Image (cartoon, grey):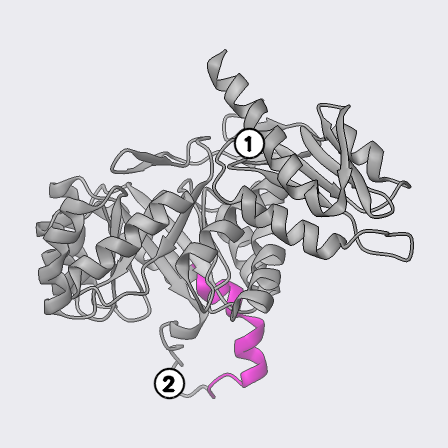
């Protein structure tokens, strides 16, 4: 096995990067892919931000980022960091002095944007401060805030089409410009992200970057949109990169509750068999053979499963074609008939009950099984 890959049966090799630590969380180096999110609260409101971080931690988030747009937000960081169950990363744009204040506040990581902190002298000042505090830096490049293209004297500026065609290379070069500054100061606790709304662009840029640096990659589709469309866009972009072995940490960027970002991230990881947290629910599509209200049953089961952290598989099946087989393959399951259904546990039918009692009977069986497992 090559030194920079890890074998994954049935999948392309995973790129192994240099490990970096945000507090107690290791990113890269073959560690499990880390799920991140970002608070939507006003960072100046430390109690509200702390409450949102607690909710994210409960959902399974492992690293949290907070916006630091001004000195008032920076002043709230010490209280936020003290109360946070998760490593806190300060998101810095434009003003490098805010990064210095965040370091003094005890944050576990910094995110810098090469598109709006361009002065190498200021970047070096931040890097020296990060090194002194033992804090990693994420170089986060977004397609929407790239440095301007420098046009040599006497040359015409590139056309819109030419700019679009070179976007992957420009994203990579923006990141490498900061990488060179960090490496020039012998700083290597670096994570890099290249993000865009455009899925093919994001994939192309990350493929180019991965071949040129040893650092962990933070992957995501930025500004992905509202939960329905944003989940699909993120699943396609993040899913392709992760399947190709690229990506050490992820954030799903949705317009909505950050807790939903965490749930979607774990579902993407689960779909690729990269990580499991909590139950996996299998449910069949409805069709003319279904003789129970499958949509209602599936929604009720999904809601009841939210409080369970054990990595179990639960099947909610609607008819006798595939239903019994899928339910038997799952840890727990129900298969519907005409106004009734069978409850399965590890392949065995344990009860046949009326439709209105199916969810209650399934959850009771799950609770018994998990309680027995914990006693062993």
In the picture provided, is 195 more to the left or to the right than 51? right
* Quarter of the rendering occupied by the N terminus: top right
Residue 158 falls inside the magenta stretch:
yes
Q: Residue 286: image x %, image y %?
A: 82, 56
Say which residue label 2 marks: 153
Q: Residue at x 38, y 58 (%)?
A: 175
Say which residue label 1 marks: 311
Q: Residue 125: image x %, image y %?
A: 13, 56
Q: Residue 350: image x %, image y %?
A: 74, 25
Q: Magenta segment, which residues?
A: 156-172
**62 relative to 287, above or below:** above
Q: In this view of the protein, which residue sits in the foreground, 370 or 259?
A: 370
What crowding class fits label 1: few (fewer than 14 Cα within 10 Å), some (14-19), or many (20 or more)?
Answer: few
Q: CA distance from mark 1 to mark 2?
A: 61 Å
Name the mark on residue 331: none
Of callouts 1 and 2, which one flags the residue occurring earlier in the amino acid sequence?
A: 2
């Amino acid at each position: 096995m090559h030194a920079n890959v890890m074998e994954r049966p049935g999948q392309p090799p995973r790129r192994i990067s240099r490990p970096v630590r945000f507090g107690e969380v290791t990113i890269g180096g073959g560690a499990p892919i880390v799920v991140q999110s970002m608070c939507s609260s006003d960072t100046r409101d430390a109690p509200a931000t702390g409450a949102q971080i607690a909710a994210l931690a409960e959902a399974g988030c492992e690293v949290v980022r907070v916006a630091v747009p001004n000195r008032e937000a920076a002043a709230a960081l010490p209280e936020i960091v003290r109360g946070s169950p998760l490593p806190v990363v300060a998101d810095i744009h434009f003003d490098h002095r805010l990064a210095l204040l965040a370091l003094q506040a005890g944050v576990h990581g910094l995110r810098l944007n090469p598109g709006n902190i361009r002065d190498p002298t200021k970047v070096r000042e931040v890097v020296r401060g990060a090194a002194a505090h033992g804090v990693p830096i994420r170089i986060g490049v977004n397609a929407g805030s790239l440095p301007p293209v420098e046009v040599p004297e006497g040359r015409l500026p590139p056309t819109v089409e030419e700019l679009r065609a070179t976007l992957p290379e420009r994203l990579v070069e923006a990141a490498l410009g900061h990488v060179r500054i960090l490496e020039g100061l012998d700083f290597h606790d670096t994570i890099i992200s290249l993000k865009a709304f455009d899925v093919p662009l994001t994939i192309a840029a990350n493929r180019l970057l991965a071949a040129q640096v040893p650092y962990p990659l933070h992957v995501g589709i930025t500004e992905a949109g509202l939960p329905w469309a944003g989940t699909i866009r993120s699943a396609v972009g993040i899913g392709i990169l992760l399947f190709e072995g690229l990506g050490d940490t992820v954030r799903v960027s949705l317009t909505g509750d950050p807790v939903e970002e965490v749930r979607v991230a774990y579902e993407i990881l689960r779909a690729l068999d990269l990580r499991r947290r909590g139950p996996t629910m299998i449910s069949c599509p409805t069709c003319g053979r279904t003789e129970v209200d499958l949509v209602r049953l599936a929604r009720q089961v999904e809601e009841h499963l939210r409080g369970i952290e054990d990595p179990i598989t639960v099947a909610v099946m609607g008819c006798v074609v595939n239903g019994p087989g899928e339910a038997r393959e799952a840890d727990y399951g129900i298969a519907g008939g005409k106004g009734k259904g069978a409850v399965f546990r590890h392949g065995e039918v344990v009860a046949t009950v009326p439709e209105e009692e199916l969810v209650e009977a399934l959850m009771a069986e799950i609770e018994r099984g998990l309680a027995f497992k914990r006693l062993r």
